[in-house]
Amino acid sequence: MDEDESSFLRACRGNRTQRTPVWMMRQAGRYLPEYRAVREKVSFLELCRAPQLCAEVTMQPLERFDLDAAILFSDILVVFDAMGVDVEFAPGPRLPNPVRTTSDVARLRWGDPREELRYVMDAVRACKRAVTGRAPLIGFCGAPLTIISYLIEGGGSRDFEHTKRMLFSAPEVFEGLMSAMTSLLVQYLQGQVEAGADAIQIFDSWAGALTPQDYRARVLPHVDRLVREARGFGVPVIMFARGNAHHLEGIASTDADVIGVDWTMGLSTAIDVVGEDRVVQGNLDPMLLLGAPETLVARTREVVAAGRRARAHVFNLGHGISRHTDPEMAKLMIDTVHE
Amino acid sequence: MDEDESSFLRACRGNRTQRTPVWMMRQAGRYLPEYRAVREKVSFLELCRAPQLCAEVTMQPLERFDLDAAILFSDILVVFDAMGVDVEFAPGPRLPNPVRTTSDVARLRWGDPREELRYVMDAVRACKRAVTGRAPLIGFCGAPLTIISYLIEGGGSRDFEHTKRMLFSAPEVFEGLMSAMTSLLVQYLQGQVEAGADAIQIFDSWAGALTPQDYRARVLPHVDRLVREARGFGVPVIMFARGNAHHLEGIASTDADVIGVDWTMGLSTAIDVVGEDRVVQGNLDPMLLLGAPETLVARTREVVAAGRRARAHVFNLGHGISRHTDPEMAKLMIDTVHE
């Protein structure tokens, strides 16, 4: 495959493609027995830190399915290794020392991920070697709000109480954290592109924690800068903010090449919001992969049909694939997209 | 107070009120030291099953704050006592025997809550005696999707995997459950109104589990029936579906007297969706109560101002009050609404 012929990259750049390109969020993951076999030997963090193993699991879904892109096997939270912040996976992420006060923030170290996350850059290079001739490689990072929310909450959260307490009582501390994190993420993405990533996806997994008003005022300016600077590195940027459809208009105001859409809204509604001149990615409810095959096929076709109204469409799930998915159902979906 | 003069009931019936009525979801709860004192002596379920104690804790926030309505102290899951389904709170709800197959469903017993939940009806009567002359009493239930999702998942859930697996692989089983649960909830609400509830709120706490397409096709017809039959009992019905702003248009298609709006969208945007001829309830982000007082006051005023565009507005939080709230901040918000 000549990369210039990649239907995924052509779609990202705004060109209509003969067949709709498809990849799946979390496509290298626990629903694959061959991934679980690797994980029997190493922990999640050991895997993230082993470039050759990253390349191996990154390739696993491409060996099974007719996918149009590979995505680096890694985790948005490894970025904390550039800051000397401990994270455990037990199995959900836990940070023993959450950052909540001005003095907590002052103690943070903002290392350069291009230097301090060499294992990620090595993983990008290893993945790139593995996928070359087969598919383009997507690098990624978390968006600043999502990353600092883990730092502040000390793990996952339902209500984002500490994050919002900071936002509503010490907005200047929140702003300082967001700004420093954005700068660090810019360097991180630059490192990934220099190491060979052909495209970048930014995951704002916890965007839905905030009201549209607060997201727009306090988060979007940083997302906008991150997207703009990342595009400066010369590869397409996909911006995916999850959990609140009312953020979509704000996300569409950024320069992102591709607007990721989660499953919580119809793709056609999303296209109405972002405009028919934008490229969209998404957005089948991953739980459809647990249902009846004929329902999966029908709903997949609906998403493909809806995507035709956009400038271009990259088919994806509207959230990561469930670990309980039968790989044959993923194959059925992918083949349906391509039919 | 003559109930006909209640600003809350007048607003629910579509009349503009001199001052905006206000109550708070979970206003009788763990942020109050006097509630925690009661809970030191009894478990959560023991409290729900003790009518006099329910009345005592229902009154606690009314003794502190200038609230315009009381809400029955209870839980949406006690309804399982009418079905002989065990629930533990540990502290989140856990059902040891989840209902996932056709034969699980066939084994369910659909008791009449008017007979089998006498302790709830007694609690309504006790609360009604306690609030009479002070404020109207809101009764409530969970919406059918929310209740059956606990039944199917066996507790709370992030992905609603089992519920959606059923929806997408055995839609007729899902439909049967929804239909039977709706009939049971109609009886439950009838019992509460007969025991003295002056208004009803229906909580579809997990509405956001489904795409707008699935919610509309598979859930809304049941919600619509529940609302219609509940209105037939002669009191105003508030319909509150949480977690997906794209469901609001569907909710507005029901006959609910009042449309509850969660914090995930601006109230003004919500009024654009439901129409200026509807009564809305909401929707301050409860986490603002953890922030700076001046921020709380400013944002409270914004919500009150936005509500003026609706036919009438009942001020509320956009989700239950956090247990970490300082009661003085709740007082500041309530007084700001009334100023």
Image: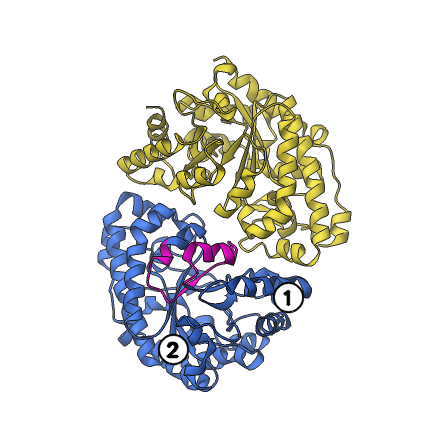
Chain colours: A blue, B yellow
**Disc number lying in front (1 or 2):** 1
Q: Amino acid at mark 1?
A: Val
Residue picked out by circle 2: A198
- Badge 1 and badge 2 in a common chain: yes
| Chain for disc number 2 | A
Q: On the rendered structure, is A46 left or right of A167? A: right
Q: On the rendered structure, is B40 left or right of A199? A: right
Q: Is residue B152 above or below residue A44?
A: above
Percent x, y of residue B141: 60, 35
Task: Determine whether label 1 and label 2 are within 8 Å by CB.
Answer: no
Q: Quadrant of residue A299?
A: bottom right
Q: Earlier in the sequence, mark 1 or mark 2?
A: 2
10 Å crowding of disc 2: few (<14), some (14-19), many (20+): many
Residue picked out by circle 1: A297
> Which region of the structure is painted magenta?
A250-277
Q: Amino acid at mark 2?
A: Asp
10 Å crowding of disc 1: few (<14), some (14-19), many (20+): some
